[in-house]
Amino acid sequence: MARAMYEYTKTVLNKVSFDATLFCKEVQKAARRLLPHELEELRIFIESLIHQNPELNQCMIYLKA
């Protein structure tokens, strides 16, 4: 089940990556719901999105906590 949540989170983040505000809200939700090792994988995934859309970098703060 948890793995399904991780895959769902990646799908949602891909879809809202056009808007940094929405993206940050979804990253916050993910930080509350995902397991620690999934958060590490998510951080890597988000870094790849940041290469395409640098303004998303501001959302990384939610994964540092």
Image: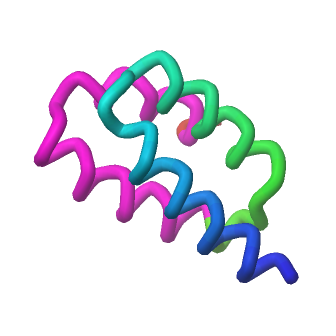
In which quadrant of the rendered view does residue 18 lie?
Answer: top left
Q: What residue sits 55% from the left and 52% below the top?
A: 12
Asked if residue 5 is positioned above or below residue 22 in the image, the reply reads below
Q: Position of residue 53 (x, y in %)?
A: 17, 36
Q: What residue sits 12% from the left and 45% below the top?
A: 52
Asked if residue 15 is positioned above or below residue 2 in the image, the reply reads above
Task: Decide whether residue 40 is among the magenta residues.
Answer: yes
Which residue is nearer to you in this view: 45 or 13?
13
The figure's colour scheme reads rainbow
Horizontal side, residue 53 vs residue 28: left or right: left
Asked if residue 4 is positioned above or below residue 43 in the image, the reply reads below
Name the residue furthest front.
15
> Which stretch did the figure color magenta?
39-63
Task: Tell me the quadrant of the picture where the N terminus can be found.
Answer: bottom right
Which residue is nearer to you in this view: 36 or 56?
56
In which quadrant of the rendered view does residue 57 lie?
Answer: top left
Which residue is nearer to you in this view: 16 or 5?
16
Asked if residue 62 is positioned above or below residue 42 in the image, the reply reads above
Task: Decide whether residue 24 is among the magenta residues.
Answer: no
Q: Principal SS element in the magenta part? A: helix
Q: Position of residue 29 (x, y in %)?
A: 73, 39
Q: How many marks?
A: 0
Q: What residue sits 58% from the left and 31% below the top?
A: 62
Name the residue furthest top.
21
Q: Position of residue 45 (x, y in %)?
A: 37, 62
Q: What residue sits 76% from the left and 60% below the top?
A: 34
Task: Tell me the quadrant of the picture where the C terminus can be found.
Answer: top right
